[in-house]
Image: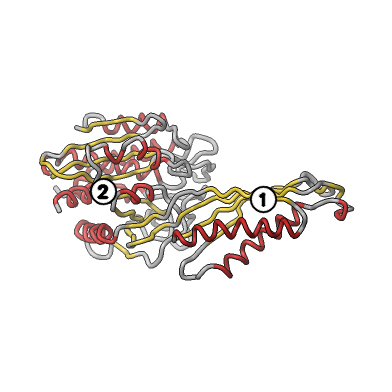
Amino acid sequence: MSFTESARDMREELVRLRHSLHTTPELGLTLPRTQEKVLAALDGLPLEITLGKALSSITAVLRGGRPGPAVLLRGDMDALPVQENNDLPYRSQTDGQMHACGHDLHTAMLTGAAHLLSARREELAGDVVFMFQPGEEGHDGAKHMIEEGVLEAAGERPVAAYGMHVVSSVLPIGLFASRPGPLMAAADVFKVTVKGRGGHGSSPHLALDPIQAACEMVMSIQAMVTRTFNVFDPVVVTVGSFHGGTTDNVIPDDARFEATLRTFSAGNRELARRRLVEVVEGVAAAHGLSVEADYGMGYPVTVNDTTEVEFVSRTAGELFGPGRYLVAPQPVMGSEDFSYVLENVPGAFVFLGACPPGRDPGTAPYNHSPEAQFDDSVLPDGAALYASLAMSRLSA
C-alpha cells in the first residue's frame, strides 16, 4: 500500500493519540506525561531512542535497510498558557493550558510517520531521525536539542530536515503551503523601564512622570518604524505589555513596557535593535528621566532551502494530486524555533490547513486563540507527507 493508504488505516490510532495529548497539555521544556504517551505510541518499533537531559525530548533513529545519509523529521510537543474555550469531548483538562497551536497534531503525525517508515524499513536507503521537541513556544527547545546532539543522532548530520505546522484558519483544510527563502520572521523582545520621580497627581510639575514619557516612547517607536525601514523588507514592532502606577492620583516612580520585534533580514534586525534603544533614550533625555532598555535576541528567521521546498511541492503533488500545494505569496510574521535546525541543515518548513469543515478559514479563530480548533482529518495526510519526504529524499 502507499503511504497515504497506510496512513488512512492508522487514522483511529492517530486521532486517539492526538485527543489524549490534547486533554493533558504541558508547557515549556518539561513534558513528562507527553513524553510518556509518545514513548508508549512508539513502543515496539525498531528505533534507537534517546531521551533529553535538560528537557523532555525524544530523539528516535530508524536505521534503514540499505546504507545512505540521514533525514530529520521534527514535531513539537508543548502547549500554551491559554484557557481553552471550546466545548469538545477531548478539551483540555488542565486549567490555563491548551494545545492552542496544534502541536498535539504535529506529535501524532510524526508518531504516525515513525510507524509508516518502520513498516518499510528495508526499503530505506539511509536513516531517519525523529525529533520530538518540547519548548517551541518561546523556550528554545530546538536549540536545546541541537546542543544535546539531535543533529548527530544518526552518526552524521542529516542532509535534509522537514517540519510541519497546522493552522486553524487562513488555509482551507488539507492544503499544504510553503515558499522558498524566508518563511517566518525573527522574533526579538524589547523590555523598557522608564525611571522618574513619583509625586501627587495634582502637581506633575513637582514630579518626573514616567508614564507620560513611556507613552511617548511607544508612539515614537511606531513612527520610527515607518520612517526607517523599507516596506518591502518589513519590520513590525508591537508593544504587548504596559504597566505603571497603582491608582489615579499618584504619579509612580517608574513605568514599564515590553515589545516584540519581527524582522526578515539581518540588516534590519540589527538596525531595529539600535534604533529602538536610541528612541527610548532620546525621549527619556528630553523629559529629564532615565531609562533601562534591554533587547533580547529571540528566534532567528525561518529560511527554507529553495531546492528542498521544490522537493516538498513535488512530493505533495505526487501523494495527493494537483491543487493540494500552494506557493505562499509572502512570509508570515510569526516565528518558529525550527529556524535553528534550518540554520544548520538545508530543509523546509510547511504549513497545513486544518480549519474544521463548516468554518470559514478567513474568519475562523487563528492559532493561539482559546477558541482555535484543528480538524483530525488532516492527521493521516500529515503523517503520509512526513514519511514520503523521508523515503523519497533518501532515494534521491
How far separated are the C-alphas under marks 2 and 1?
42 Å
In this picture, is 219 found above or below 187? Answer: below
Under mark 1, the amino acid is Phe
Q: How far across and how far down the image is residue 165, in percent?
A: 37, 51
Residue positioned 32% across, 36% down in the render:
149
Question: In the depicted view, which residue is nearer to us: 332 or 351?
Answer: 332
Q: Is residue 316 above or below residue 7?
A: below
What SS does tag 1 mark? strand
Label 2 neighbourhood size at 10 Å, few (<14), some (14-19), many (20+)?
A: many
Answer left or right for 277 relative to 72: right
Nearest to viewer (mark 2 / mark 1): 1
Residue at numbered disc 1: 242
Side of 253 relative to 114 (left or right):
right
CB contact under 8 Å: marks 2 and 1: no
Q: Secondary structure at mark 2?
A: helix
Classify residue 111 as left or right of residue 56: left
